[in-house]
Image (cartoon, helix red, strand yellow):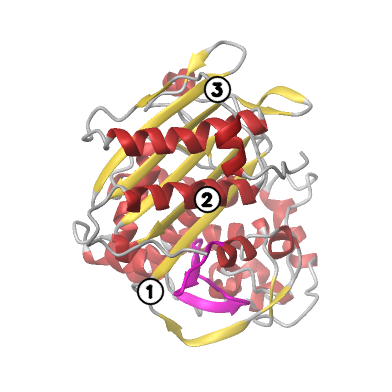
Amino acid sequence: MKPNKTPLAALAAAVALLLPAHPADAAAPVAQPSLHAAIGNVIRPLMAANDIPGMAVAVSIDGRRHVYAYGFASKAGGLPVDARTLFEIGSVSKVFTGTLGAWMAARGKIALSDSAQRHWPALAGAPIGQATLLDLATYAAGGLPLQIPDAVRDDAQLLAYFRNWQPDFPAGTQRLYSNPSIGLFGRLAAQGGNARFDTLMTHSLLPALGLRDTFLRVPEQDMGRYAVGVAQDAPRVRVSPGALDAEAYGIKTTAGDLIRLVQLSMDASALDPALRQALAMTQTGYYRYGAVLQGLGWEIHDAPVTRDKVLAGNTAAIALEPQAVARIDPPQAPAPDRYVNKTGSTRGFGAYVAFLPTQRIGVVLLANRNYPVPQRIEAAWAILQAIQASRPAATPATPTK
């Protein structure tokens, strides 16, 4: 899909699209009407510009969450988006994988310094066997590609793929965003916990986080609320199974559950010590590339944060080309004045999550179309500014460009 270059501000002024828009989280206090209207003024033009059938938007403000629904979960069937609509979140799933690995480390099941071969002995003797779990989690193992070949279908083929892989550069020197890299990290972290990844995620981590509407495999009884994605060449599309899909891009969730994860990432005081430590580890900077810190799933921008810096840290080049990295030793603990974010896409869905812990605000954007990342960031930034504008004047201001 070609990016639409029309500024969102101009679209907001020019387009008035009549789509269903309503507070969708009945359990939460309704946000101020002015904020609700401001969010709608961002989302409706965004949907119109990109022919997005439906979106769910969640915001967290001082520990309170609000979820809004727009448009349709199924374009063909006219099923409206609501608070229970499940969306594919693509690579935002990597945050869940990072959290699971960090949880295993916090419980002493693994160490990020462990070699891959320690947890999968069959990798011994191959270059990948010497990579550390941290190298794999931060895409710094030596140049693993973006995707695993489609021909890799079972464990024997996956093992052969990793054993035959040859690095393009020394581990720890370049970051190349990669599903096989963090996918292998997730698998090995789960093996450190003596369980399959899907079992540990579904039956241990998600319940521990209180995420009741988050799935790797959507149960049959919940398929009716699973949104249908659209693409230019496919009016009805959902993600296809693949090797390490659960670990790299397999989560389906609601905006309400995802904003709960954001809230816990900003304030984990209600959780047990190991989970609190794990969520802090996901926001720890292990490598720096350009102005961005790589956490475990999350990508982090130090203060002073600007919109232009966030846009620069989420370009196609950052996602598809090697980036020289500098190891942070010791790792940089989460700074208060940070902007934490992650994008995610599948063929038919687009997601974006961002939060500012010091200001206790966050936003989740879920759509059943894969639309340009810069527009997601622009929309989220506008919503965060709208949140700040709705607060008392004494509240610190959102960073501006």
How far is disc 1 from disc 2 in space, using C-alphas? 19 Å
Q: Residue at the spot x=65%, y=33% of the render?
A: 49
- Sooner in the amino-acid sequence: mark 3 or mark 2: 3
Tag 1 and tag 3, C-beta contact below 8 Å? no
State the mark number for residue 205: none
Quarter holding the N terminus is top right
- In the rendered image, residue 179, in percent from the top left (x then y), is placed at 65, 56
Query: Disc 1 or 3, which lies upstream in sequence?
Result: 3
Label 3 and label 2: CA atoms lie apart by 29 Å
Question: Would you place residue 383 above or below residue 268 in this image?
Answer: above
Give the side of residue 253 with respect to residue 14, left or right: left
Relative side of 182 to 270, left or right: right
Does residue 196 show up? Answer: no
Whole-angstrom CA distance, mark 1 to mark 3, is: 40 Å
Residue drawn 72% across the image and 58% down it: 316
Whether 305 is among the magenta residues is yes
Given residues 278 and 326, the one toward you in this image is: 326
Tag count in the figure? 3
Quadrant in the picture for residue 313: bottom right
Disc ID at residue 92 = 2
- What amino acid is at disc 1? Pro
Point out residue 157 in the picture as x, y percentages from the top left corner: 75, 52
Magenta segment, which residues? 285-307
Which residue type carries mark 2? Val
User: Where is mark 3, residue-wise?
Assistant: 17
Question: Considering only vertical position in the picture, is 162 above or below 170?
Answer: above
Q: Residues within 10 Å of mark 2 (few under 14, many from 20)?
A: many
Disc 3 marks a residue whose amino acid type is Leu
Which residue in the structure is indicated by mark 1? 334
Which is in the foreground here, disc 1 or disc 3? 3
Q: Is residue 299 above or below residue 83?
A: below
